[in-house]
Image: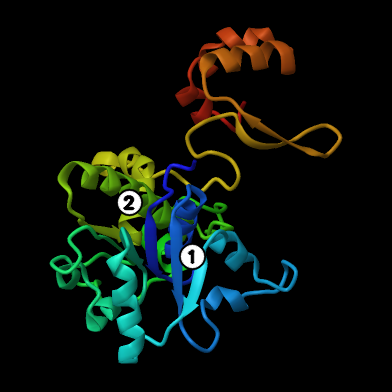
Amino acid sequence: MRPLEGITVVALEHVIAGPFCTRQLADLGARVIKIERPGGGDPTRAYDDRVNGLASHFVWTNRSKESITLDLKQPKGLEVVFTLLQGADVLLQNLAPGATERMGFSYEQLKDRYPQLIVCDISGYGSDGPYRDKKAYDLLIQAESGLLSVSGSEDAPAKAGCSIVDISAGMYAFSNILAAIIRRQKTGTGCRIDISMLETMAEWMSFPLYYAYDGAEPPARAGAAHATIYPYGPFTIGDGSTVMLGLQNEREWAIFCDQVLQQPELKTDSRFSSNTKRSELRHEL
């Protein structure tokens, strides 16, 4: 028996963040009912056709689910959703800002009718503040959160090669829903979860923010290397090929000096006696 068997999730979702969350719930045994729009369904269905004619993004984030097409601009379509919610434990949505409220599916509109319901809203910028009504895309949040300031080379920033912001938001939604299910076992009532894509990436950017504390210099873009740990990254060796090295503590540094460099004297060289010193003198080292 999987841990979420018996849990039903209604998903007003599209693209990555919402579907990535509910796919994990489905993997744990929840029944996930995905509601798609007429005329093409989830936009990721059309991203490519690399998986036996299906889109890679769609296959990745939508396995183990049921799907139904509903026109939510029509009263009959809305009524089907209200009927599904009678037996649901979770409603997740990551539609455009304000869309679910206009349709009558906000937590405040549902809590009296469905007191057991956990409502999880995923948006770009949260439910209040000056950006609450703005649409958000993965690339924009990578830039606005500062991720691009620490990713890429000295010459140019680079976005992450996968939808890291959507994945982050989906993961936080997933963990918060699990916590809300446990909370409901104790209280008997549902609750609202508000997931902001920008806030999730601000959390992931905590290391650079703390590193630049009190006006200090932020970490520099270092390509595949690390801005503050050394040796850590790609290195060209004698035959011209590249190896990846990752050393994170003094024990590993000592082993590296003995067994790889075969220069044990570097272990006790005061210039390289800590990671901070090695990082500062990386070009000399």
Tell me which numbered mark, 1 or 2, is placed earlier along the sequence.
Answer: 1
Q: Is residue 41 left or right of residue 56?
A: left
Q: Which residue is mark 2?
A: 177
Residue depth check, mark 1 versus mark 2: number of the one nearer the observer:
2
Q: Could you say where residue 155 lies in the image, as x and y percent from the top left?
A: 56, 57
Image colouring: rainbow
Residue drawn at x 51%, y 76% is: 42
Which residue matches tag 1? 16
Closer-to-camera residue (265/86) = 86
Relative to 54, residue 227 above or below: above
- The residue sitting at 46% across, 83% down in the picture is 37
Q: Quadrant of residue 89?
A: bottom left
Q: Position of residue 80 (x, y in %)?
A: 35, 80
> Looking at the picture, which amino acid does disc 1 mark?
Ile
The amino acid type, in three-letter code, at marker 2 is: Ile
Q: Residue 250: in sight, yes or no? A: yes
Farthest-out residue, bottom:
74
